[in-house]
Image (cartoon, grey):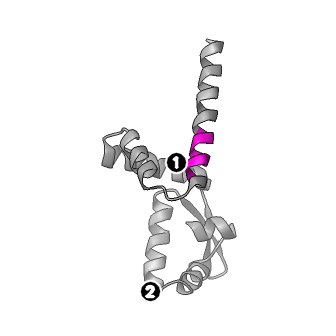
Amino acid sequence: MKIVWKRGRSTVREVYEDLLTHRKIAYTTVMTMMGTLEQKNHLKKTEQGRAYVYMPAESQSKVVRGMVEEFVKRVFNGSAKPLLVHLVETMDGDEDLEELRRLLKGKAGSLKEERGKK
């Protein structure tokens, strides 16, 4: 998916060749995965000559959000708190913690705003 999001549109061959620069993988594996992603409505395809051209059916942020929500449901019984605790405990740099602090502060501010409107 990352390759198709980056390129905008790709054939199986293009994805395969891109993946080969990072690791050994079979062409048929890439073809199967892209077919599966199409069946799950993450990709859509159009025929162009003798090949199919795949495009993202959904934005990267929407797919990632859904995957994270599914992961939290499956692994943490729907509660994100244990995941957040783990992430905070394993963060290495002050930059990451500062970014998290800024995000939480912004979220808290927007929640206060919403409550004030009700």
Q: Which residue is mark 1?
A: 65
| Percent x, y of residue 22 | 53, 83
On the image, which quarter does residue 12 sit in?
Answer: bottom right
Residue drawn where x is 45% and y is 49% of the image: 88
User: Can you see residue 54?
Assistant: no
Query: What residue span does the magenta drawing correspond to?
Result: 96-103
Q: Which residue is mark 2?
A: 26
* 98 sits left or right of 85 in the view: right
Q: Amino acid type of disc 2?
A: Ala
Instruction: Using the image, tell me which numbered label, if any, was put on residue 19.
Output: none
| Percent x, y of residue 89 | 41, 51
On the image, which quarter does residue 109 sit in?
Answer: top right
Residue drawn where x is 58% and y is 67% of the image: 2
Residues tagged 2 and 1 counted as in contact (Cβ below 8 A): no
Q: Nearer the viewer, residue 31 or 72?
A: 72
| Percent x, y of residue 30 | 48, 78
